[in-house]
Amino acid sequence: MEQISKQARKDPLVTERQARALHWEGKDRLVSAGDCLYLNVRANSKTWLLRRRLRSGKMIVRTLGQYPTMSVREARAIAVAEGLKKIPSAMTVKDLAEAYYDEVVQIEHRRPEIIRGYLDRSIIPELGDRRIVELNPADIAAVILAYRERGTRTADQLRSVLRALFTFAVENGVLPDNPAAPLTRRVSGYRPKARERVLTDDELIKVWTITHEHGRLLRFLLLTGLRIPEAQKGERDGHRWYVSAALSKNKRPHWVHLTPTALAQLPIEKSSPTATQAWLRRWCERHEIHPAFTPHDCRRTAATRLGDAAVEPFIIERVLNHTLQGVMATYNRAEYEAERVAAAQELERAILKVVAP
């Protein structure tokens, strides 16, 4: 009859090194690996067993596989998944937190003690006894809001831990949805700063001297008011640049008129927005432009130049493909094709007046 070592109960098997070091000592024995998982050490083999006791008192034993063919991590993944699936309605946040820490944090995180701290200091004290199936985003937000007194960054790290914790539950079939998923950085205390940056005349002139391929993209953005993905992935048809609903921020198809100067910037390079912004930061630094502007500031500059040229505000909104508000959104379905073409031509004239007087 296999014996379960008392020492094994205190120090469950966690690593491959521990598993390799186990040897038969004259009798079969079971070594705990946590989550009802045991390694049965015999004279000529090491076998993974999943042992669960039912409420009736009956012990159910399931053989998972042989070690080392099945690693410690693989065996424990099966054990955790089986355990989670058996009691989803009764599982508490503390149960989930311990499973997440054992199965994910200790294995994948370089500094698991940081995650352990968030679990012990906030998540388990505040939510530990709650059943996970009863939680909603408001419950999660309350925990984060209470943590904001420790600082915005600390609160946002807690938000990240909570999202990861409940993602683990979804991945293991315990929850259909992540209750922390809808919570953005705003709940942590972050507030995006409204930008009002537009390019000056001197900066426009410098942009028109850029020979790098990113220069064509920046000039195209200034002449069309498009966003980077719209400029890179849209399609040309004659003097129009079409943006599909999938590319558009408001999920509505869109087009802009291409003036001769805009056409001259084609083709547009396909680098990622992140790479483009990184290059632009370096370029601004070399040219002593402070504060540095972003590609999206080109779009704001286009709108500002159109306003300076006395283009009607609702036409500017059409050019930028902004969602109209109020009565305009309900009744104004006109495309204003002629006005949008005229606006593009006016924008070209306004910019060329600066860069090529």
Image (cartoon, rainbow, N blue to C red):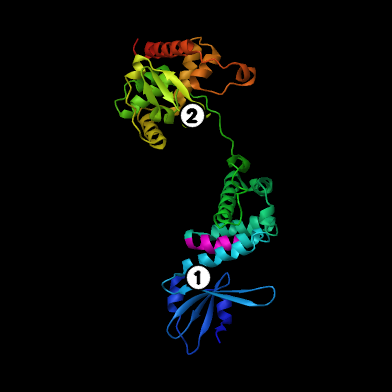
Q: Secondary structure at mark 2?
A: loop
Q: Quadrant of the C terminus?
A: top left
Q: Residue furthest bottom?
A: 26
Q: Secondary structure at mark 1?
A: loop
Q: What number is the disc on residue 128?
A: none
4 versus 181 height, above or below: below
Crowding near the residue tagged with mark 1, few <14, some 14–19, many ≥20 C-alpha atoms within 10 Å: some
Which residue is disc 2 drawn over?
Answer: 245
The magenta segment is: 97-107
311 versus 236 height, above or below: above
Residue 40 or 160: which is nearer the viewer? 40
Q: How many marks?
A: 2
99 inside magenta stretch: yes
Using residue 134 as the reference point, say whether residue 279 is left or right of it.
left
Which circle, 2 or 1, is nearer the viewer?
Answer: 2
Q: What number is the disc on residue 14?
A: 1
